[in-house]
Amino acid sequence: MKKLANKVAVITGASKGIGAGIAKSLAAEGAAVVVNYSSSKEGADKVVAEIERNGGKAIAVQGNVSNLADVTRLFAETTKAFGPVDVLVNNAGVYQFGSIEQLTAEEFHTQFDTNVLGLLLATQGAVKTFNENGGSIINIGSVVSSIAPVGSSIYTATKSAVDGITHVLSKELGPKKIRVNSINPGMVETEGTHTAGFIGSDFQSEQERTAPLGRIGQPEDIGLVAVFLASEDSRWLTGETLLAGGGVR
């Protein structure tokens, strides 16, 4: 039997990149998947179509995770389509690098609203829909909270907050049989890292030079870790932060 048979998983920000990779990996192991997206309906529909072509079950649901009404609707549509939630992956996130001289209040709020508030609201919504058997919440952090790259003050602050929230909620939700862990990826080749100019840059070369495994990640690399944390294979893990950066730390 597949590891996630009869499970329902919600993945935020899953229309592309790491989120899409996680959605496909969870679906491949039998989960019914909700592909949440904020603006890219086309991307989300493509992810759903690929999952269905491979024999899986998935729907796309629009919603901005930093908006409480959208989050409420996301989980209402999830339970209507598939029933109670078993797995939440808090993947939705944004990033913008820049020096301290370039920092603006607007950029601060943009990143914190999605990366921190959005994670908290989605978790709050999911907790209301888990059944008595509990489940698994997987937060997507980043190795930036460990390596603190230059120009990432806001982004690193948001991902450091994710580390802290993971530890707090693992204690708070443990009595409800809900496990809370974090995957902290290193550099991953996605649409976003291409758009940002990281792919093919000196930054990529430096990541490959310092990574013991000698390469940057692919979305499916993170998807496989998410399957582990979503499944019974990790039933004795909670409050953990798994660095998934090919050894970068």
Image: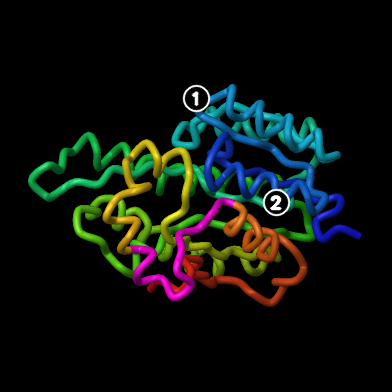
Going 59% across and 22% down the picture, which residue do you hit?
42
Going 57% across and 41% down the picture, which residue do you hit?
12
Q: Nearer the viewer, residue 19 or 195?
A: 195
Most prominent secondary structure in the magenta stretch? loop
Element type where label 2 sits in the image? helix
**Is 229 positioned to the left or the right of 122 in the image?**
right
Residue type at mark 2 is Ser
Element type where label 1 sits in the image? loop
Disc 2 marks which residue? 25
Disc 1 marks which residue? 39
Q: Earlier in the sequence, mark 1 or mark 2?
A: 2
Counting from the top left corner in percent of width and height, residue 245 is at 46, 66
Find out whether the residues at labels 1 and 2 contact each other: C-beta distance under 8 Å: no
Residue type at mark 1 is Ser
Counting from the top left corner in percent of width and height, residue 98 is at 19, 46
**Is 78 positioned to the left or the right of 213 in the image?**
right
Rendered position, 52 above or below 239 = above
- Quadrant where the N terminus sits is bottom right
Q: Is residue 216 found inside the magenta-colored segment of the image?
A: yes
What is the spatial separation of the Cα atoms under label 1 and label 2, in whole angstroms? Answer: 22 Å
How packed mark 2 is, by other alpha carbons closer than 10 Å (few <14, some 14-19, many 20 or more), is: many
Name the residue at the right extreme.
Answer: 1
Q: Which residues are magenta?
A: 207-219
Counting from the top left corner in percent of width and height, residue 235 is at 72, 72
Going 49% across and 25% down the picture, which residue do you hit?
39
Rendered position, 63 above or below 112 = above
